[in-house]
Image (cartoon, helix red, strand yellow):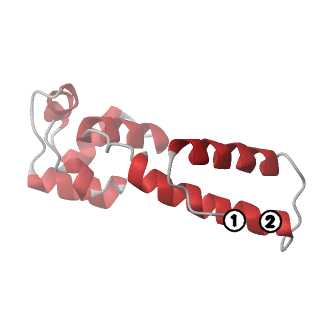
Amino acid sequence: MLKSIKEEKQYNDALARVYELMQTDINEGSVASDELEVLSILIKEYELVYHLLPSPSPLEAIKFRLDQMEMSEKELGDILGYRSRKSEILSGKRKLSLAMIRKLNEILHIPAEVLIQAY
């Protein structure tokens, strides 16, 4: 019987069991499939409380998204409207303006919560 995960040992045991289940050929609707689904939910809930990942800095997020979308830094300059300021922003010498944050959110789909963080 599955129980909620309340401590690190239970969490590690659940991860190990999920790994075991993932190594098998599971049929949809089977007991193993249900176990995998429930364990995944329990693990996710535990991680939300005890293993929260920090948000990336705005500069890390911009660089990651450019790489992910296979865009160049020149294209970032076009998005921001200031080609010369692009390098100042990426180096951290200049902060993002509200207008820049709005454009980055709209075009690169970077959450505004990430872009407005201090860096």
For mark 2, what is the residue?
Answer: 33
Number of numbered discs on residues: 2
**Outermost bottom residue:** 29
Residue at 19% of width from left, 25% of height from top?
A: 91
**Numbered label attached to residue 77:** none
Which quarter of the image is occupied by the N terminus? bottom right
> Image height check: is 82 above or below 26?
above
Q: Let me know if residue 69 appears in the view.
A: yes
Local SS, label 1: helix
Position of residue 52 measured from the top left corner of the image (x, y, whole percent): 39, 47
Position of residue 58 measured from the top left corner of the image (x, y, whole percent): 25, 41
Residue at 90% of width from left, 55% of height from top?
A: 25
Q: Is residue 91 left or right of residue 72?
A: left
Residue at 63% of width from left, 59% of height from top?
A: 40
Task: Name the amino acid type tagged 2.
Answer: Ser
Calculate the distance from the C-alpha at mark 1 to the C-alpha at mark 2: 6 Å
> Image height check: is 32 above or below 59?
below
Q: Is disc 1 surrounded by few (<14), some (14 to 19) or many (20+) residues within 10 Å?
A: few
Position of residue 107 measured from the top left corner of the image (x, y, whole percent): 33, 57
> Image height check: is 35 above or below 73?
below
In front of the other: 68 or 54: 54
Quadrant of res 90:
top left
Which quarter of the image is occupied by the C terminus? top left
Task: Name the amino acid type tagged 1.
Answer: Glu
Question: Mark 1 touching mark 2, by CB under 8 A?
Answer: yes
Q: Is disc 2 surrounded by few (<14), some (14 to 19) or many (20+) residues within 10 Å?
A: some
Residue at 83% of width from left, 63% of height from top?
A: 32
Q: Let me know if residue 70 appears in the view.
A: no
**Numbered label attached to residue 37:** 1
